[in-house]
Amino acid sequence: MHRIAAALLSSLVIVTLADIAGAADAANGERLARRWCASCHVVAADQRQGNTQAGPFSEMAKVPGLDAGKLALFLLGPHPPMPDMNLSRSEAADLAAYIETQGK
Ligand code: HEC
């Protein structure tokens, strides 16, 4: 019983720390990107290859005027040839925050 409580508490602490650092959203976005986007897009610097039609996230992040808000909106709508991923608003925002970090 105590062990379970301790495990729950420590995961709470980790989540809270990540929130304070302001990294929670982008970190979740990275997890989502690696799971759902990496089959087509190069989503991180350590990824070698994606699909040739889909741009790497590091390029998207540099497109002038394409900020996190626009990316999130784009991700919420359907846009062939990308599959409709039924992202929630917070998932789209996390992904957009993550994509933005890739331009730096
Ligand atoms: C099945 C392959 C595939 C998957 C999976 C996929 N994409 Fe794409 N995506 C594409 C292609 C192909 C394009 C280019 C569409 C075009 O040029 O019209 C694109 C375009 C985009 C664009 C627009 C880029 C721009 O410059 O306008 C964004 C943003 C994007 N994808 C984000 C994502 C995110 C985030 C995910 C994961 C949640 C994802 N994609 C998953 C294939 C994919």
Image: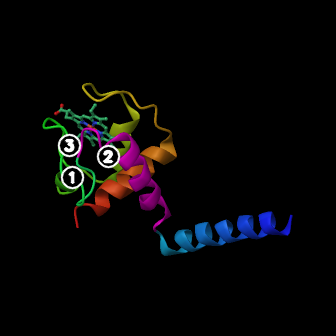
> In the rendered view, does 84 fall on the left or right side of 21?
left
Single out the mark in the foreground, 3 or 1.
3
Residue ID at (42%, 47%): 32
Which quarter of the picture shows residue 36?
top left
Q: Which residues are magenta?
A: 23-41
Q: Which residue is mark 1?
A: 65
Q: CA distance from mark 2 to mark 1?
A: 8 Å
At label 3, counting other C-alpha atoms closer than 10 Å, the crowd grade (few under 14, some 14-19, many 20 or more) is some
Q: Are marks 2 and 1 in contact (CB under 8 Å)?
A: yes
Q: Earlier in the sequence, mark 3 or mark 1?
A: 3
Q: Identity of the amino acid at label 1?
A: Gly
Q: Mark 3 falls on what kind of element?
A: loop
Residue ID at (36%, 57%): 98
On-image quarter of the N terminus? bottom right
Ligand 1 quadrant assignment: top left
Q: Which residue is mark 3?
A: 50
Single out the mark in the foreground, 3 or 2.
3
Q: Identity of the amino acid at label 2?
A: Lys
